[in-house]
Amino acid sequence: MDTKILLSASWVVVTLIYLYDDVLRICSGDFAKLMANLSFNQGIWLGIAILMLTPILMVFLTLILPQPVSRWTNIIVAALFFLFNLLGLPTYPSLYDKFLLAASLVFNGITIWYAWKWG
């Protein structure tokens, strides 16, 4: 199978994991509890939007960027998300959060592996 398609698919999976986790967090009431103690300004919300848009953009960028650029972009972005989620994993109290974040770590690892082999 074409590596570009595999990498794009891995970003789709990661994006869906993040979205599903957010839906569960809202439905469980965990999000409301978290937000009750926080007050974010527009800059923080913009940062969150950029962070969450990144894996969505990676689906497209993986398909259109030249191979060497796409390869390194996938490695770097997946590694950053891996580290970000690994550091954040202990801060989530719910078992479903930990499970879904662990699944996203696996797919970030798969992305890094396929991008590293690509070439």
Image (tube, rainbow, N blue to C red):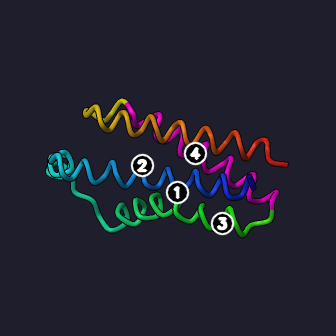
Q: Position of residue 17 (x, y in %)?
A: 42, 49
| Tag of residue 61 | 3
Question: If you read the primary sequence from the N terminus, does the residue marked by circle 1 or circle 2 appear first?
Answer: 1
Question: If you read the primary sequence from the N terminus, does the residue marked by circle 3 or circle 2 appear first?
Answer: 2
Q: Which residues are magenta?
A: 67-89
Q: Position of residue 83 (x, y in %)?
A: 53, 38
| Tag of residue 12 | 1
Q: Gap between marks 4 and 3, in whole Å?
A: 16 Å
Element type at marker 4? helix
Name the side, left or right, on which 108 lies relative to 52: right
Q: Amino acid at mark 2?
A: Ile
Labels 3, 2: front one = 2
| Tag of residue 80 | 4
Q: Position of residue 113 (x, y in %)?
A: 70, 39
Element type at marker 2? helix
The residue wearing badge 2 is 17
Check disc 4: other Cα within 10 Å, few if <14, some if 14-19, many if 20+.
few
Q: Position of residue 15 (x, y in %)?
A: 47, 55
